[in-house]
């Protein structure tokens, strides 16, 4: 009986999990021909696992990379954002003004003494009942 070498085979998901990458990276290497399915199966033979893991991590980084932006680059300001701020400021100012007016009226007008003489009587001296 001949003993052949048994190669370890893995599924696409197992290769991705072992390398710590998304399955898209494994599919990319399969598409490039760096990995291949065993004919007639859904299994992949990985000849050099360390090299394959490094390649998969490199592919995963390039698949999910974002364009570089300057660290202190000012964000694009849209003109629409100023309108709600102005409306909020106006509404708060109106409420504050209303509170001030109401507090002045309740404080001053309710505690003011009611004069016994009218303003005309005070200025002209007419209408004085005491004589």
Image: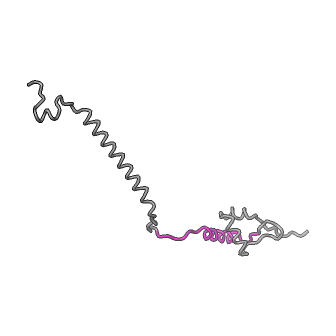
Q: Say which quarter of the image contains residue 22.
A: bottom right
Q: Say which quarter of the image contains residue 16.
A: bottom right
Task: Name which residue lies at 89% across and 70% down.
Answer: 2
Coloring scheme used: one colour
Question: For this rendering, which residue is in front, 16 or 125?
Answer: 125
Task: Name which residue lies at 52% across and 71% down.
Answer: 68
Question: For this rendering, which residue is in front, 59 or 52?
Answer: 59
Question: For this rendering, which residue is in front, 63 or 96?
Answer: 96
In the rendered image, the vertical position of residue 10 relative to residue 88, given as above or below: below
In the rendered image, the vertical position of residue 33 relative to residue 103, given as above or below: below
Image spot of residue 3 (x, y percent): 86, 69
Please identify the residue farthest to the front as the structure is shown. 126
The number of numbered discs placed on residues in the rendered structure image is 0
Q: Say which quarter of the image contains residue 119.
A: top left
Task: Name which residue lies at 84% across and 69% down.
Answer: 40
User: Where the N terminus falls, by quadrant?
Assistant: bottom right
Please identify the residue farthest to the left as the structure is shown. 131
Magenta stretch: give its range.
45-70
Asked if the stretch drawn in magenta spans residue 123, the answer is: no
User: Where the C terminus falls, by quadrant?
Assistant: top left
Image spot of residue 44 (x, y percent): 76, 68
Please identify the residue farthest to the top as the structure is shown. 130
Residue 45 horizontal side relative to residue 68, left or right: right
Residue 9 horizontal side relative to residue 88, left or right: right
Asked if the stretch drawn in magenta spans residue 60, the answer is: yes
Please identify the residue farthest to the right as the structure is shown. 1
Image spot of residue 8 (x, y percent): 78, 66
Image spot of residue 28 (x, y percent): 69, 71
């Amino acid at each position: 009986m001949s003993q052949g070498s048994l190669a370890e085979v893995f599924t696409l998901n197992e290769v991705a999990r072992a390398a710590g990458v998304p399955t898209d990276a494994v599919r990319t290497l399969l598409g490039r021909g760096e990995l291949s399915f065993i004919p007639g199966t859904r299994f992949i033979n990985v000849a050099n696992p360390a090299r394959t893991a490094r390649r998969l991590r490199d592919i995963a980084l390039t698949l999910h990379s974002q364009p570089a932006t300057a660290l202190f680059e000012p964000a694009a300001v849209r003109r629409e954002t100023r309108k709600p701020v102005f409306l909020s400021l106006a509404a708060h100012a109106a409420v504050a003004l209303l509170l001030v007016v109401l507090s002045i009226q309740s404080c001053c007008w309710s505690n003011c003494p009611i004069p016994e003489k009218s303003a005309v009587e005070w200025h002209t001296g007419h209408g004085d009942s005491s004589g």
